[in-house]
Image (cartoon, grey):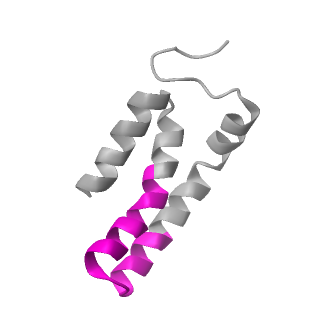
Amino acid sequence: GLATLATWLVVAFALRYSSLAALIAALAAPLYALLMWGGNRMVLVIAGIALLLVGKHWQNLQRLLAGSETKIGSGKKT
């Protein structure tokens, strides 16, 4: 959990996109779990949760690819 949080913080501060930080942290979480625990059911559960989170952020991902996602601290676009 702490490694995932650290990933989110680094990406958020470096790139200023909360949604991108969440996506990268979610995708990194199963890798961290695999490194810590090896291949077991917990890693599969974490990977499933990560995929659900990516699905939840699908519209944010589309805005990121289109270049229309707002950055942290920039306020809402009007």
Instruction: Please state the horizontal and vertical placement of residue 53, each as a whole percent of the image.
Output: 51, 57
* Position of residue 60 in the picture relative to residue 11 (left or right): right
Viewer-nearest residue: 41 or 3: 3
**Which corner quadrant of the image does residue 70 belong to?**
top right
* Position of residue 51 in the picture relative to residue 31 (left or right): right
Q: Is residue 33 magenta?
A: yes
Prevailing secondary structure of the magenta residues: helix
**Which corner quadrant of the image does residue 67 belong to?**
top right
* Position of residue 51 in the picture relative to residue 67 (left or right): left
Establish if 27 lies above or below 11.
Answer: below
Instruction: Please state the horizontal and vertical placement of residue 24, each as a whole percent of the image.
Output: 49, 50
| Residue found farthest to the left | 2
Residue pictured at 32% horizontal, 83% vertical: 38
Quarter of the image that includes the N terminus: bottom left
Establish if 27 lies above or below 19.
Answer: below
Instruction: Please state the horizontal and vertical placement of residue 17, each as a whole percent of the image.
Output: 51, 31
Where are the magenta residues, as a range? 25-48
**Which corner quadrant of the image does residue 41 belong to?**
bottom left
| Residue found farthest to the right | 66
Instruction: Please state the horizontal and vertical placement of residue 71, each as a whole percent of the image.
Output: 53, 23
Residue pictured at 32% horizontal, 73% vertical: 35
Viewer-nearest residue: 38 or 75: 38
Residue pictured at 66% horizontal, 36% vertical: 64
| Residue found farthest to the bottom | 40
Q: Is residue 24 magenta?
A: no
Quarter of the image that includes the C terminus: top right
